[in-house]
Amino acid sequence: MSKPRARNFPDREAIVAFIRAHPGRAGTREIAHEFGLKNADRAELKHILRALADDGTIVKRSRKLRKPETLPPTLVADITGRDRDGELIATPTEWDDEATPAPRILIHVPRRAKPGTVAGVGDRALLRIETIESDETASYRARVIRVIDRTRARMLGIYRASPQGGGRLVPVDKKQAGRELNIAKADSAGAEDGDLVSVELVRTRGFGLASGKVKERLGSLATEKAVSLIAIHAHDIPQEFTPAALREAAAAKPSALQGREDWRAVPLITIDPPDAKDHDDAVHAAPDDDPNNTGGAIVTVAIADVAYYVRPESALDREALERGNSVYFPDRVVPMLPERISNDLCSLVPGEARGALAVRMVIDADGRKRSHTFHRILMRSAAKLAYSQVQAAIDGNPDDATAPLLEPILKPLYAAFALVKRARDERDPLDLELPERKILLKKDGTVDRVIVPDRLDAHRLIEEFMILANVAAAEMLEKKGLPLIYRVHDEPTVEKVHNLREFLKTLDMSFARSGALRPELFNRVLDQVRGHDSESLVNEVVLRSQAQAEYSAENYGHFGLNLRRYAHFTSPIRRYADLVVHRALLRALGLGDGALPDSDNAETLAEIAARISVTERRAMKAERETADRLIAHFLADRIGNIFEARISGVTRAGLFVKLADTGADGLIPIRSLGTEYFKYDETRHALVGSRSGSMHKLGDVVEVRLVEAVPLAGALRFELLSGAEVRPRSPRARGGGKIKTPRGRNAGHPDVHSKAHPGRKPRGTSRKPGRSKAGKPKKGKS
């Protein structure tokens, strides 16, 4: 028999109103405190909250509750147009919920706007958000904090010369496909046929082609060396540092011992890929000689002291914030900081004294971190090693560099890793392993081959030590009461979990309906299919059910890692978030110059988090598009060749496939699958033939022929040769109607990159059953 409610127990509407008034900050404890509920009433409160979550009235983000589709108080948005009253309307730059259209935001423009806050259509801006109770055109009202990127009347494309003089610009952006520009000879700036150029719009016409003027020649597309330039310019990734920033970098001096602890005798080593140009993290481990920690270890992680050189509000700081992070292409790196800083003063090269911020962590025999301390040090790296080099030494094949380090340094590292791995396995983070392909180029910049590097314990060792250090940083700053930028990963939405559950039913598998949502629930599913034909398919669907990690000044935990608090601390050379965390630690612990200013509060850090989350997505898109273009170049002379592939996406437009050897993505249009109509089965992630019942589903291994390659767009089109799974016909199958294929690119899962190339498609037929068995993918570096 349930206990009676308190006399002042709130009704559902009051609870929802409170949650709405405190988005992201209202948990069970806060609601109970607001309404004066005692312990005896909390069970009833939890029952009500569970019911509100089940019917979709609220959603849970870690331990906090909010209204569905509620935007954070600070975010980056694109101003897309005006409403009927002439007011500016914006939409979030990043919106991952495919099932729900992005909310519209009404921009409030004050009479006396501050400099840098006057925005226009096409601009990208940082906004302060508030909800609107009732409005026909928008769900939110916002004010502009800062305009991040102004719209530019410029276009990027390939110059095609005309025999009569002058030429035309063919845009590289698919959204501008068909919008060619006429370029007069006098406006060509000497561009040659095939050059990648940046063109300024000169004038538009009511009829005929608009005109443009070449402002910059960016290089020839005769080789793949210019391919990364397309992505750099298409995404407005800054390349050149300002003269002021370069002057600051040139004037910087190496760190001295003053204000630091002398750790130059500690044999810290760096372990990186063999082609790494900067080395910003070093590690060391030793058994703990404390009798109260028998079997334990001391793990030390030292990170380059970037905050010593890049001070708040300096020219270097402004440049770093604008970039947000370094961007990595197969042929180049666009760094967050000048090479003088990243590849010299902050690179922990052997034998050179370098400033660092180190965390010393005491690990017990079960692998749990008992305590940690932070230190500002002067260190000297004992060695620069590669992952494969370290692993070979541990496996019994040391070389000249690793042989003298094996007993005193490498074996203690692996012994500490064995402890840490126990705690990691007990924590049970999400165990999705994904292949990490690497494109190797020849000296002339063309693609040599695509490889999947071996996944070694040396990689896992560094990753687990870095995760420990990141957790220690977050815990220290919370303990000191300082605001920080968290690395957060939300749990899957109710809708995505429901879709996953329905999909698993088709495989006679179940997914828990009640209880807290934890990574271990997904791991149980993955364990059930390991080694079976459906392994690849289930891994793919579980991946698509997950949210995307981001930066936030509000902590709602890291679901994938199964951690309550997590921050990025270990790579301030290439991530601005880590630099902010370093500054906060310097301020919290009184460790000297370069600390976070007192003026940088939670509101300021929320703005920074919103900006760098966008630059991170920008970098990911640029890197992905460059890889697509390089692979399309690589395969352009293999039209007609047959490849083994796996279906990586299923939509109403057709099948997206990923080649087994190169990882290249391409489209098989639905109209090329055969003479019958195919219906899209969202639950099964499949296309089903209306007459034969043949099925093409996510994860199937198929045989395809390359029909077309468009290097400029990074698009590949294939023809299906085999792989249809024949299913018994059902009464529903006889009623299938024709599916209209949408034009342009079909939006898939935000974490899955796919390209669709419009045009006439050849027809083919599915001939024989395919397989859905795929080898276990390798896990990429996080």
Image: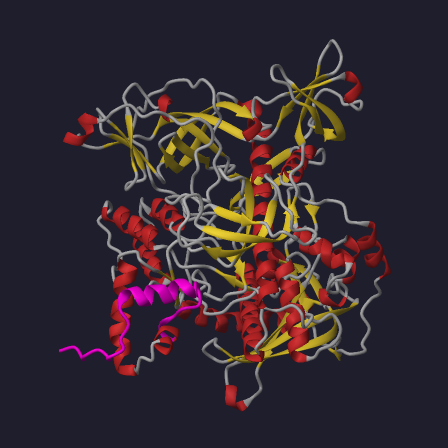
Magenta stretch containing residue 481, yes or no?
no
Residue 695 position, x and y percent, is 28, 32
The quadrant where residue 638 appears: top right
Total number of numbered discs in the rendering: 0
Relative to the observer, which residue lies in front, 248 or 283? 248
Residue 236 seen in render: yes
Residue 516 seen in render: no
Q: Please give the name of the residue rendered at 67% of the width and 37% of the height, measured from the top-left corner.
A: 233
**Residue at the top extreme, as displayed:** 164
Left or right: 48 in relation to 773: left
Magenta stretch containing residue 13, yes or no?
yes
The quadrant where residue 298 appears: bottom right
Relative to the observer, which residue lies in front, 430 or 412? 430
> Compared with residue 363, is residue 744 higher up or lower down, i.e. above or below?
above
Q: Please give the name of the residue rendered at 77% of the width and 61% of the height, measured from the top-left corner.
A: 314
Give the quadrant of the N terminus: bottom left
Residue 132 position, x and y percent, is 44, 54
Q: Please give the name of the residue rendered at 54% of the width and 30% of the height, measured from the top-left corner.
A: 175
Say how the picture is coloured.
secondary structure
Relative to the observer, which residue lies in front, 779 or 18? 18
Left or right: 553 in relation to 339: left
Residue 229 position, x and y percent, is 68, 36
> Compared with residue 63, is residue 154 higher up or lower down, i.e. above or below?
above
Residue 363 position, x and y percent, is 52, 78
> Compared with residue 366, is residue 514 higher up or lower down, i.e. above or below?
above
Find the magenta span and give its range.
1-29
